[in-house]
Amino acid sequence: LEIDWQGARQVRQAVPGCCSIFILPPSLEALKTRLNGRGTDSPEVIARRLADAVADMSHWREFDYVVVNDDFDRAVDELADIIAGRGGALRKDRPELAPLLANLLEFPTP
């Protein structure tokens, strides 16, 4: 189930004990590159989408797990580990996430 943070909040309220996973980009620059690589949006739309993404990322604490999508195959393996109940090392409170989250959340919003 792929939903935004508001939908995830509703699911958690309706299904106590469900597992929630927040997927982060490895950096804002990587996210911008991915958005530009699509070739479908104007620079203005991309800037708005980046700002919206940062606002969405500010809700990461509401989720049980965080996966950083810096390598697709590794991200898939991490998701599989979480689903199989082996995702303890991917909990949201791991210290190595702090610098990444600080970088991601400092993006200036319009």
Image (spheres, rainbow, N blue to C red):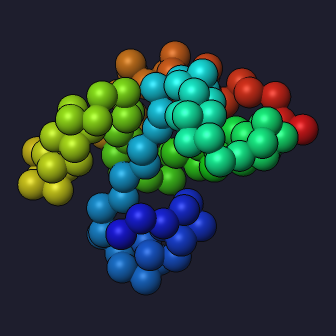
- Quarter holding residue 93: top left
Residue 42 coordinates in the image, percent (x, y): 78, 42
State the image coordinates of residue 90 (x, y, percent, origin top left): 27, 36
Name the foreground residue: 58 vs 29: 29
Q: Residue at position x 30%, y 69% from top?
A: 17
Q: Residue at x 46, y 38 (%)?
A: 24
Question: Can you see residue 78?
Answer: no
**Above or below — where is 60 with respect to 13?**
above
Quarter of the figure with the N terminus:
bottom left
Task: Indicate the quadrant containing the C terminus: top left, top right, bottom left or bottom right.
Answer: top right
Q: Is residue 22 above or below residue 30?
A: below
Comparing 16 with 42, the one in front is 42
Could you tell me which residue is drawn at 57 percent across and 27 percent down? 33
Asked if residue 93 can be seen in this view, the reply is yes
Residue 47: quadrant of the picture: top right
Please report the residue visible at 72 percent of the width from the left and 24 percent of the height from the top.
106
> In the shown orientation, is residue 18 left or right of residue 103?
left
Nearer the observer, 12 or 70: 70
Q: Is residue 80 left or right of residue 21?
A: left
**Is 25 drawn above or below residue 79 in the view shown?**
above
Q: Is residue 27 left or right of residue 80?
A: right
> In the current view of this chain or complex, which residue is farthest to the bottom?
14
> Residue 67: image x %, image y %?
35, 39
Numbered circles on residues, count: 0
